[in-house]
Image (cartoon, helix red, strand yellow):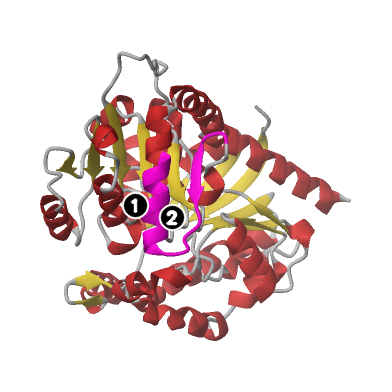
Amino acid sequence: MMGNKKLRILLIIEQCNPEWTSVPLQGYYFYISIRNLFNTTLVTHERNKPALEKVHSDRDIVYIYESNFTKWYYKHAESLSKIKGKIIWPLYNTLTYPIYAEFNHLVYKKFKTSVLKRDYDIVHVVTPMMPRYPAKIIKACKNIPFIIGPVNGGVPYPKGFQEIARKEFAGFNFLRLIGRWLIPGYRETYEEADYILAGSTYTLNLIKSLFDVRDEHIELFYENGINDAFFSKDPKVDTEESIQINLLFVGRLVPYKGADILIDSIGQLRPQIQENISLIIVGNGSEKESLQQQVQNLDLKEKIHFPGWVNQQEILEYYHKSDIFCFPSVREFGGAVVIEAMANGLPCIVVDNGGIGEYVTEETGFKINPISREFVVQELRKRIEQLVEDRALHAAMSYEAVERAKEFTWDSKAEKISDIYLKLLSNSSE
């Protein structure tokens, strides 16, 4: 693996926590994978300190402490962002921006002089991962490369799914536009960055359309990675005697994730197929009760089960025991669960809108065009039946899924980042 422990990397990862999920956990894995190759200084928020101190008390980590008012405001921001008990994420991200702004300013204040003195060779801002936040430290990166990302987001709802968009309060997305023009330093961050990592093709094109960014300063770099623990130790063996086919869905039970679409498709399977399948829906969320009622109405209680949210060891067991992964989320930025499923040899059936449509290839599963809800239901039904009946196709996709997942290991991602760092340093020296 390439790398250079003599190179000093200033890693700014506001959300970096080994005990949390989603972006904070991804931020943490980026940190430890990059630290394995380079001499790093991690800059993160104080709320991550208890978890990081448990595992890395000896490391070079600088914690940014917030004001008492910001601590108070952070506790109340979530409740201020709720309508009928549900978090409106565009509103939440807008209301919590002042919390990030304080962190951003304090990082600049603390590290401005050392960056100007070239105490570091590269400055890399990893989180937040949404492409709507500035990084003030770029003002000090006069003589050293500045890299931001992977950033991902902004994927719109498909035209045929406006009802779901309304349920998810997509009308608040106009707040993104306000932020783009009113947040100080936002445009400067992206137009003056030496390199930008974009987490999806959509976001890459969005950034290029919003800012004056040349092709040589941006590349596609998926934010999700995977640990070796997710790779199945035993290859799936498909025999004619194995009649039962286990389907799996993993995700929050909210409208846009599409669990209701999957349930409808199960209800429309041919009787001889439906008889030999079962579906596990892992997760919790606002739609759980309505989904359970949907299952009851379709008389599928014996076929579809809801274990709720489970820990990592339990989810690994569900991956190991399953045969096909179904994830018809109509708007997904990343979708790490798809990579986890592929690592366990599961052919994946997904909706082609956002990151998951780029993870899945023709060799590893099926991508469904989100024309309409009914179209997705019918295509999902067809693809499930195809994989159940065509054992050779299932076996081939299972093998290719594991090979595809290997491209997303954290070691593999660290190697790619190492190449980018070394290229940037070579270009700057020239």
Image marks 1 and 2: residues in contact by CB distance under 8 Å: yes
The residue to which callout 1 is attached is: 48
Label 2: element kind = strand
| Above or below for 418 versus 71 | above
- Front residue of 130 and 101: 130
- Front residue of 158 and 372: 372
At 28% from the left edge and 48% from the top edge, which residue is drawn? Answer: 268
- Front residue of 140 and 371: 371
- Inspect this view and state whether residue 61 appears: yes
Mark 1 crowd level (few <14, some 14–19, many ≥20, 10 Å Cα):
many
- On the image, the x and y values in percent for residue 309 come to 20, 45
Residue type, mark 1 in image: Asn
- On the image, the x and y values in percent for residue 315 come to 27, 34
At 35% from the left edge and 67% from the top edge, which residue is drawn? Answer: 66
Q: Is residue 221 left or right of 253 when viewed as pictured?
A: right
- Inspect this view and state whether residue 252 appears: no
Q: Identify the image quadrant of residue 362.
A: top right
The residue to which callout 2 is attached is: 44
Label 1: element kind = helix
Q: Which residues are magenta?
A: 363-383
Say whether residue 371 is magenta: yes
| Above or below for 163 versus 231 | below
Residue type, mark 2 in image: Thr
